[in-house]
């Protein structure tokens, strides 16, 4: 009987996994982004150092022919036999301007697994399992019956377009939502954690922060808010002691978050050390914050008023501003570029001064910085269209020029490349589900929906999830760049919260029967 039960559950999990990657099945393969190549090449280079075995991604420069003409597949295969010198030359060229941090080799290893097994299907299957694992752990934390609740929530998420689309996406965006959910659970639940659950949440959080810097910023922010709330919390009236476990009932969850943060910091330090050993130069971070300040206006105004006496490296480019954030970071046209065309020394100076530049601009125009930051965060908060899953001309051009020919052939045959996916319809459905779920949750929270209630744990979790979604908008919109994909990657959490409320009502109904 037990064996039969396990087989049924395994079949259900397999079915849910396939259901969660339905966009990839419809598309004819996973969804790519130009940065997918950078993640893979980082991991491929590391593996090649140890094993001396390379994949086609390390020969991507040899894929497209010079002058924009396309190589045939035979040309590409022939090029693989002559890439040793080209690889060395490529690494030397990269070293001249420094390796850029932010494209995690840890996530690159997840993609690398998809490369060596063919077609990246293993990568998106693992991402589907990660989402199901997060749901499973959430149900356990809320003391809900895992079966059949996991099947209901998993199937419900398949119908929320953002969830299966980001599961099928070869970028680490999915893990931002997982990180917010993990923090929401860990900061909300006050009971003792089962050791297995604690270890799994720790691993999920560590992976999320290692995979992308924005996940680390979100987690650190939520951890900080949790500490502040605990410091402001009054001792329990029946408590006769100021013991940490009395004043801070969620101290176990905070400890898991702190340990995951320390692990992520150690992992990032290792990457920086390896990059410096490989090139002989310290790796750099893209100056997203400076680009945002310049694009919004306060940074441009400061440079015009305070250069050259402020002695910022950006003063050398003050005459070229204002610039869009993309032009600041990646532009190559004369008079419309900064970071991309700069030398290593200039890049390092611009990268290292961005926080000092932010403080200087903040002192110069605090109202302007606050106004533009709130505006950017608000715009990001409400923009969760799914446009990134229909390749625009710019994305197509980059992939056409940089992806290996054998991979590019599959990308060009996909529905996303051909523009046949109903992305606009899916975006409309997503907006309807999100705002409908949010209205439902607020009605339940206010007590206007008498047949539905939230447990104390679920109320706290919903609150932390909402804070996490707002923090995500601030991190991405105000500190980086506004992009609909940044908010779409986490917005599936709102419909999931509504599903958990319904599960709570269903569970109570069964108990009363």
Image (spheres, grey):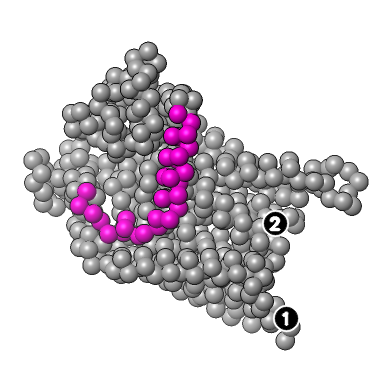
Residue denoted by label 1: 511
Give the x, y percent position of residue 41: 32, 41
Farthest-out residue, right: 240
Secondary element under disc 2, as helix, strand or loop, is loop
In this rendering, position of residue 44 left or right of residue 184: left
- Whether residue 117 is visible: no
Hey, which quadrant is residue 97 in on the image?
top left
Q: Find the magenta span and give its range.
A: 365-394
In this rendering, position of residue 249 left or right of residue 265: right
Say which of 434 and 446 sits in front. 446
Q: Does residue 446 sit above or below 351 in this rendering?
A: below
Q: Does residue 165 sit above or below 78 in this rendering?
A: below
Residue denoted by label 2: 189
Q: Residue at x 50, y 58 (%)?
A: 130
Hey, which quadrant is residue 277 in on the image?
top left
Hey, which quadrant is residue 264 in on the image?
top right
Q: Residue at x 42, y 65 (%)?
A: 431
Give the x, y percent position of residue 259: 63, 41
Q: Does residue 229 sit above or below 356 in this rendering?
A: below
Say which of 414 and 232 sits in front. 232
């Amino acid at each position: 009987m037990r064996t039969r039960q396990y087989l049924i559950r395994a079949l259900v999990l397999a079915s849910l996994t396939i259901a969660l990657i339905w966009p990839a099945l419809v598309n004819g393969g996973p969804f790519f982004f130009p940065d997918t190549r950078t993640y893979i090449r980082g991991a491929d280079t590391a593996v090649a150092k140890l094993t001396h075995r390379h994949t086609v991604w390390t020969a991507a420069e040899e894929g497209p022919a010079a002058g924009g003409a396309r190589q045939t597949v035979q040309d590409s295969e022939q090029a693989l036999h002559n890439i040793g010198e080209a690889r060395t030359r490529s690494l030397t060229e990269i070293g001249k301007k420094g390796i850029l941090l932010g494209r995690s080799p840890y996530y690159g290893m997840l993609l690398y697994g998809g490369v060596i097994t063919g077609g990246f299907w293993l990568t998106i299957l693992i991402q589907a399992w990660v989402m199901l694992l997060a749901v499973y752990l959430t149900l356990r934390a809320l003391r809900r019956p895992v079966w059949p609740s996991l099947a209901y929530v998993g199937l419900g998420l398949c119908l929320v377009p953002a969830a299966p689309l980001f599961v099928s996406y070869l970028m680490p965006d999915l893990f931002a939502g997982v990180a917010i959910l993990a923090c929401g659970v860990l900061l909300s639940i006050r009971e003792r954690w089962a050791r297995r659950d604690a270890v799994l949440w720790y691993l999920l959080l560590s992976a999320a922060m290692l995979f992308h810097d924005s996940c680390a910023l979100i987690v650190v922010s939520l951890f900080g808010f949790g500490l502040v709330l605990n410091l402001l919390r009054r001792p329990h009236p029946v408590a006769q002691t100021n013991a940490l476990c009395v004043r801070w009932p969620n101290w176990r969850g905070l400890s898991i978050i702190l340990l995951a943060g320390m692990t992520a910091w150690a992992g990032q330090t290792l990457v920086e050390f390896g990059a410096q050993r490989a090139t002989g130069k310290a790796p750099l971070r893209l100056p997203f914050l400076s680009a945002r300040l310049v694009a919004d206006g306060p940074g441009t105004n400061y440079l015009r008023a305070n250069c050259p006496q402020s002695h910022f490296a950006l003063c050398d480019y003050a005459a070229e501003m204002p610039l869009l954030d993309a032009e600041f970071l990646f532009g190559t046209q004369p008079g419309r570029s900064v970071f991309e065309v700069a030398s290593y020394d200039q890049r390092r100076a611009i990268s290292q001064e961005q926080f000092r530049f932010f403080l200087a601009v903040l002192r110069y125009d605090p109202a302007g910085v606050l106004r533009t930051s709130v505006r950017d965060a608000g715009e990001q908060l409400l923009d969760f269209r799914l446009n990134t899953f229909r390749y625009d001309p710019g994305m197509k051009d980059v992939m056409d020029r940089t992806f290996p020919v054998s991979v590019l052939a599959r990308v060009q045959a996909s529905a996303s490349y051909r523009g046949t996916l109903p992305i606009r319809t899916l975006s409309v459905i997503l907006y309807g589900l999100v705002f409908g779920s949010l209205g439902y949750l607020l009605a339940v929270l206010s007590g206007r929906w008498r047949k539905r209630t939230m447990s104390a744990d679920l109320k706290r979790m919903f609150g932390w999830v909402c804070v996490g979604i707002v923090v995500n908008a601030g991190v991405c919109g105000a500190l980086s760049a506004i992009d609909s994909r940044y908010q779409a990657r986490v917005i599936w959490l709102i419909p999931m919260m509504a599903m958990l409320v319904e599960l709570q009502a269903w569970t109570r109904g069964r108990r009363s029967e």
